[in-house]
């Protein structure tokens, strides 16, 4: 079978792409709005794009239900030019899913997920302390691809690695790191121990939103 993209609906294209480009790394992105409120959200349309300069890219879905059509992550990055990409290990899969719940703007996902914040070295948004790897980023380029998506390219300014995932000679101990990636639909993931499923959470099957 083969298809011309312009003959497929958006959801058909989505299903083909996310079920063939596998596994995809997961970015747990922390941003701040202009008032300093922290937002935390996971994205699997993500990857590193080069080392000179050190850059990475995020594919950010827009939100037709918000006043400006943007999700909090996109809005915050465009407003402040800063964000942190936190990479997750297998033991953080459930916390990552909690951060994916569509909480109202201004509510702190990391608190619901039981995650702690740590100060960054060069940007305002904090890091997720439990994440084994964190990249502090400055906005390099933002591409508005229409009503459904933005592409954000970030320049990595500062890298953090937990000492626990480093070998004595400073290399990454992949077993200690224990990273996971996004697989096909129905919320499948893959780690060093094989495939596993983690249910997508919502207000109906996840923790209630925090009270303001």
Image: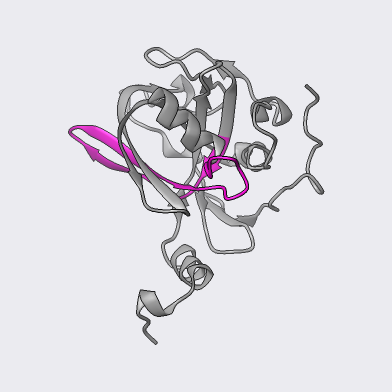
Quarter holding the C terminus is top right
For the point 81% across and 48% down, which residue is it?
Answer: 205
Q: Quadrant of residue 122?
A: top left
Considering only vertical position in the picture, is 33 above or below 145? above
Residue 134 in sight in this render: no
Q: Quadrant of residue 55?
A: top left
Number of marks in the rendered image: 0
- Please state the horizontal and vertical placement of residue 9, each as a whole percent of the image: 49, 73
Residue 26 in sight in this render: yes
**Residues rendered magenta in the picture:** 41-70
For the point 70% across and 26% down, which residue is it?
Answer: 114
For the point 37% across and 75% down, which residue is it?
Answer: 6
For the point 73% across and 29% down, which residue is it?
Answer: 112
In this rendered view, identify the residue nearer to me: 26 or 109.
109
Considering only vertical position in the picture, is 41 above or below 164? below
Considering only vertical position in the picture, is 187 above or below 16? above
- Please state the horizontal and vertical placement of residue 87, each as a whole percent of the image: 48, 35
In this rendered view, identify the residue nearer to me: 79 or 201.
79
In this rendered view, identify the residue nearer to me: 2 or 179.
2
Pick out the residue farthest to the bottom: 1
- Please state the horizontal and vertical placement of residue 92, each as a whole percent of the image: 61, 36
- Please state the horizontal and vertical placement of residue 200, each as a whole percent of the image: 68, 52
Check residue 57 for magenta coloring.
yes
């Amino acid at each position: 079978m083969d298809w011309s993209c312009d003959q497929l609906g958006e959801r058909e294209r989505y299903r083909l792409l996310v079920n063939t480009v596998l596994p995809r790394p997961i970015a747990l992105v922390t941003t701040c709005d202009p008032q300093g409120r922290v937002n935390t959200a996971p994205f699997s349309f993500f990857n590193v794009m080069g080392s000179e300069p050190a850059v990475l890219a995020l594919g950010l879905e827009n939100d037709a239900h918000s006043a400006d059509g943007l999700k909090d992550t996109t809005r915050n990055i465009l407003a402040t030019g800063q964000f942190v990409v936190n990479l997750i290990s297998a033991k953080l899969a459930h916390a990552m899913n909690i951060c994916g719940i569509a909480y109202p703007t201004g509510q702190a996902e990391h608190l619901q997920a039981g995650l702690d914040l740590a100060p960054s070295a060069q940007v305002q948004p904090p890091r997720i302390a439990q994440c084994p790897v964190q990249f502090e980023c400055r906005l390099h380029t933002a591409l508005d691809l229409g009503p459904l998506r933005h592409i954000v390219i970030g320049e990595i300014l500062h890298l953090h690695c937990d000492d626990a995932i480093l070998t004595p000679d400073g290399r990454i101990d992949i077993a200690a790191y224990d990273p996971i990636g996004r697989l096909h639909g129905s919320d499948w993931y893959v780690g060093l121990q094989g495939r596993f499923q983690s249910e997508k959470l919502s207000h109906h099957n996840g923790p209630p939103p925090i009270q303001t």
